[in-house]
């Protein structure tokens, strides 16, 4: 069976004082191959914990993850990760960073060279391929990180706030690039964000998670990612349905934050 299945995932962190924190509770979800999903919610709703379980960095307390019919038990090249900070080798050239995965897998340049050069073209970095990463701007470094992830040809791309540290203009350009790569590669992409606008733009499926314990609160199926491919994203944001959904989700998250603050004040 192709696609990603999240089956009744729960995650509990035990504390030194004998207590525990229930980060996730009974999260279940199926993603078809090639779907683009954004995830957002208030702090403490388990977004990053879920992403780390999907990456294989954490083993869930209960439940299981399956990808293409087999159980996920740890990190693997079939699942690529793009972090908020690129986690690049700053002393290496752009091309060496992008080709790092295939080279570590023992492949010869004849096997990966043309694909790496193609990816550098796609993300607009061919003219910078011999530059050291530390010489690049933040937005360019995130393009390197995307290309490096794609060079490993993963089935699923996991993105943890990958555009959060960028200025507004660069962030919008990168959002357009994510949509372009999604459409051209057919990869399954899961993107964590704190921005409601970004979640609407980059999620044909959008999950709003609720905290304590982390769980799926509401799921939306949206047209804006498809509309945004190759288009001016500012025009997409002007769509009346975009504004309606933005206000609805903002209100939903605001109510959750108010509830959390009320619990905290009551406990103190």
Image (cartoon, helix red, strand yellow):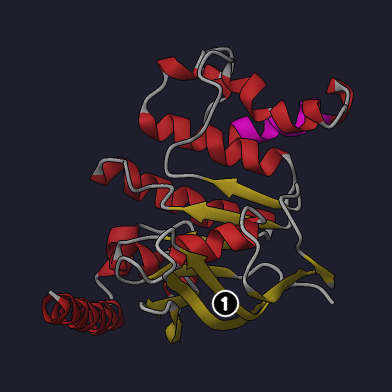
| Residue neighbourhood size for the residue with mark 1, other residues' Cα within 10 Å, grouped as few (<14), some (14–19), many (≥20) | many
State which region is magenta. Answer: 112-120
Residue 63 is drawn in which quadrant? bottom right
Residue 74 lies, with reference to residue 239, above or below; the image says above
Q: Which of the image's four quarters has the N terminus? A: bottom right
Q: Which of the image's four quarters has the C terminus? A: bottom left
Give how far across and how far down residue 108 sits, in percent: 88, 23
Residue 52 is drawn in which quadrant? bottom right
Q: Nearer the viewer, residue 135 or 43?
A: 43
Residue in the image at 27% along x and 43% along y: 169
Query: Can see residue 157?
Result: yes
Residue in the image at 76% along x and 53% along y: 78
On the rendered structure, is 233 left or right of 75? Answer: left
Residue 183 is drawn in which quadrant? bottom right
Query: Can see residue 183?
Result: no
On the rendered structure, is 12 left or right of 4? Answer: left
On the rendered structure, is 29 left or right of 239? Answer: right
Label 1: state its secondary structure: strand
Give how far across and how far down residue 47 sits, in percent: 45, 66
Give how far across and how far down residue 8 sits, in percent: 63, 83
Residue in the image at 60% along x and 32% along y: 121
Q: Is residue 117 magenta?
A: yes
Q: Is residue 6 magenta?
A: no
Residue in the image at 19% along x and 83% along y: 259
Give how far across and how far down residue 236 sits, in percent: 33, 67
Residue 162 lies, with reference to residue 187, above or below; the image says above
Which residue carries the number 1 mark? 10
Which SS does the magenta portion mostly show? helix
């Amino acid at each position: 069976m192709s696609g990603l299945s999240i089956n009744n995932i729960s995650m509990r962190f035990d504390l030194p004082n004998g207590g525990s924190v229930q980060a996730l509770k009974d999260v279940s979800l199926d993603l078809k191959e090639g779907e683009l999903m954004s995830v957002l919610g208030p702090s403490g709703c388990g977004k990053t914990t879920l992403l780390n379980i999907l990456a294989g960095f954490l083993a869930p307390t209960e439940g299981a993850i399956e990808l293409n019919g087999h159980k996920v038990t740890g990190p693997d090249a079939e699942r690529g990760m793009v972090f908020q900070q690129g986690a690049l080798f700053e002393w290496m050239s752009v091309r060496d960073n992008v080709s790092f995965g295939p080279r570590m897998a023992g492949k010869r340049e004849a096997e990966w060279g043309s694909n790496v050069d193609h990816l550098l073209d796609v993300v607009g970095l061919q003219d910078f391929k011999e530059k050291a990463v530390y010489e690049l701007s933040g937005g360019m470094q995130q393009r390197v990180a995307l290309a490096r992830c794609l060079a490993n040809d993963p089935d699923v791309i996991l993105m943890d706030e990958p555009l959060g540290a960028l200025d507004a203009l660069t962030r919008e350009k990168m959002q357009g690039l994510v949509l372009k790569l999604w459409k051209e590669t057919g990869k399954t992409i899961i993107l964590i964000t704190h921005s409601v606008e970004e979640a609407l733009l980059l999620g044909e499926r959008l999950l709003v998670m609720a905290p304590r314990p982390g769980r799926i609160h509401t799921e939306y199926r949206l047209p804006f990612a498809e509309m945004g491919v190759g288009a001016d994203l500012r025009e997409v944001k002007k769509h009346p349905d975009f504004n309606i959904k933005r206000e609805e989700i903002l209100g939903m998250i605001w109510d959750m934050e108010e509830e959390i603050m009320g619990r905290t004040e009551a406990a103190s």
